[in-house]
Amino acid sequence: MFPPPPQPLTTLPSLPDLLLTALSVCFLVSSSKPHIASTRCPFPRRFLKIPAMSITATPSKNTTTSALNTLPPRRHNFASPQSLSDWLKPRLPSESFASWGVKPGTKNVHNLWLELSQGETSLADSTPPIRTVHVVLVRVTDKHGKLLLESHQELSDGNIRKRGRPLSEKMKPNEDPESAAVRGIFEELGSAIVGARPNSEIADIVTIDPKSYEMRVEERDSGSYPGLPGCYVLHTLSATVEGLPDGDFCTEEVDEYEGVFEEKNLAERAVSVKKHYWTWVSADSIDI
């Protein structure tokens, strides 16, 4: 006897079986793709803005901490500006890196090294590195409701850098926004305030509205360090300061690194701000 002939395939796989097979293939294809690390600002989009609230509750600290847990490894310490330069060169466009401290309005590698040494800045261990910095923006207003704006700066190398923004200050490690705001007011407006109220402490003539606090994150290339992507965590507060001039005025910067480093030439080789130029504008004319 001959074996029975093979029966034709008359039964097709069911629709659920086809869907399951397709999903399995998609999973295998997607899992085989190499993982490419993102060089964008590592803070999740849901942290881009926090509504106004009292800073005494330190909401930004908890929120930022949870976001920082997802960040890539950071580089904080370099033995010298030269070691930082050697680390940066293969990670940045050569033309951009060469313009640091040469192009008007830019800073140099000594500035970045000082920021890292003071804990004001961190760098992601990536290519290109991402510079993350926490900045407090202080909306200083006068009795007429006008907003104080820094129009431009005079730098130690003789260049002028345009600003067009309220007083801003990089925050120190473990510093809350209110303390950073008071310190920034002293460093950048102190020469004008002390002249008006010589016997007063800065804290006695500065009033900060804690309900005005907001935090947002901006992603943009650094104007100070061309070619270096920046992640700016901006903490905004409103304040009033007694004794400021009614019209446009100029102040001299307090040297923030004076006496901090034993080797004085490290700070001297950095590009510093010598003078700030301020003007009062209508609060409605600028959205910050």
Image (tube, grey):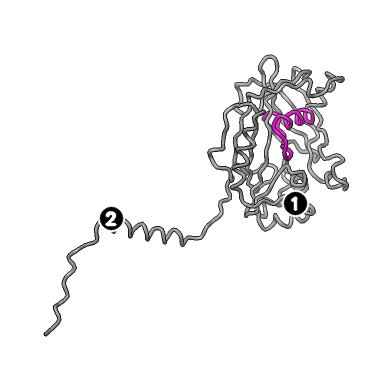
Residue annotated with mark 1: 77
Give, as a three-letter code, the residue at label 1.
Asn
Helix, strand, or loop for circle 1? loop
Q: Kindly indicate the quadrant of the structure image that contains residue 172.
A: top right
* Residue drawn at (77%, 34%) of the image: 154
User: Where 138 falls versus 170 (above or below)?
Assistant: above
Residue sticking out furthest to the left:
1
**Residue 96 percent coordinates (x, y):** 67, 50
Q: Nearer the viewer, mark 2 or mark 1?
A: 2
Point out the stretch of residues depicted in magenta.
Answer: 165-188
Choose the circle earlier in sequence order: 2 or 1.
Answer: 2
Q: CA distance from mark 2 to mark 1?
A: 56 Å
Q: Kindly indicate the quadrant of the structure image that contains residue 242.
A: top right
Q: Kindly indicate the quadrant of the structure image that contains residue 177.
A: top right
Residue annotated with mark 2: 16
**Residue 94 percent coordinates (x, y):** 67, 55
